[in-house]
Image: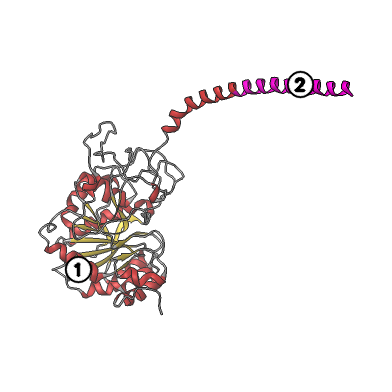
Amino acid sequence: MKLIWVSIRILGASVFLCSLIGFYHIGKLMSRSNTALSKRSIQTTPSHQQNTFPKTIGSLIQDVPKSSLPNEIWDQDLHATNTKQVDEDEDVRINGEFSALDPTEKEPTMTSRGKQHDARAPLVRDIFQHSWKVSGADICQKKPKVDILVVVISSPSHILQRNSIRESWGEQVKERKRMALLFILGRSPDLDQHVINESIQYEDIVLTNHEDTYENLSLKILAALQWYQDFCPQAKYLVKVDDDVFMQIPRLHTLLAGMNRSKLNHGKKLILGNVASGWAPSHEINSKYYISPKEFNKTVFPAFVTGPSYVISTPAIPELLALAWDHPYIPLEDVFITGILAEMANVPRRLVMEFRNNAARIPAKFLGCTLLRTISIHQVTPFEQKEMTILARNPQCGPPK
């Protein structure tokens, strides 16, 4: 029995000794692995830190930090830069007339683009057509005291959208002596004659000599600015509206009439609307918001007013046009005209929360509350325009009882 007990003790000691030796070698191996891993971490950390760039246009707006970079003046040769620091808060100035924007609320809607080769962008002057297939020259002549020119951006095939506006808030514009309404369209070979017939019937169409495409949207807006200079120079404000936007004309008139009476704002260069700051250009060729580095080579866009609806005070228009002609063409209309050109012309972009340029539709049950504090609402179908015009006369907050 003693012999068996001694044997068990010797066996246990041997197992314990083997375990110690095994743990020693495992620990040594792990130490070497950790050392190698630490070296790799040290080598890759700087590279990882370099990839903390601003989010691009396609990202959710709450992920986009407000830029602290200067909005540099465009340099034609893409070499020289202006190192003067610009405080973006001075571009988006707010006084007692304007409320603050919650930047996490929504993402600006921008013009979409297809793929594009990386060729040098042409200058605007080389592709802009200062001529009209249908001029609509007498639209403002019939109202010689026009203060507010409402320009609806439409496409030849959007007949339903135009008629729905004519039968709803567009009628409110035409009833006012100091407001005028026009629809501006680009050319489409299959539909030009239909548009000409429509212009004869309603006398509110301007047909440019540019092809009606997404890539030509900036040309269409520049044509609207040029049309103001040619045919309606008495207007004090140009209101740009997409044809899927509902406008509360009485609220718009109240805002602009108040600004016109204000000594602070009367006769000043201004762009009013839903301001976006800190947006970085997308250089991804497959992105719907792609922009070539040769079109725009800065890290962050200047503050711009999102496209569905905005107001330009007409003292700003001649300078915006003059700067546009010698600038490389950029199809992103709101970025180009209300951001890049406005920055070059020192035109302040002022935030007006009542311009609801929402990227998503607003549920019908909330429209009553929304109408109490908005001037424009984006993503509206033609069938809703008349209904919303009626609802806006006596909006009720909350779901129907």
Q: Is residue 244 visible?
A: yes
Residue that numbered label 1 is attached to: 254
* Residue stretch rendered in magenta on the structure: 1-30
What's the residue at 34%, 66% (across, down)? 195
The single residue placed furthest to the right in the displayed view is: 1
Please say if 23 is above or below 196: above
What's the residue at 72%, 23% (across, down)? 19
Q: Is residue 172 left or right of residue 243?
A: left
The secondary structure making up most of the magenta span is: helix
Instruction: Classify residue 71 by image quadrant.
Output: top left
Instruction: Classify residue 312 by image quadrant.
Output: bottom left
Quarter containing the N terminus: top right
Residue that numbered label 2 is attached to: 13
Instruction: Classify residue 21 by image quadrant.
Output: top right
> Which one is in front, 280 or 52?
52
Q: Position of residue 395 (x, y in %)?
A: 32, 75
Element marked by disc 1: helix
Please say if 275 is above or below 204: above
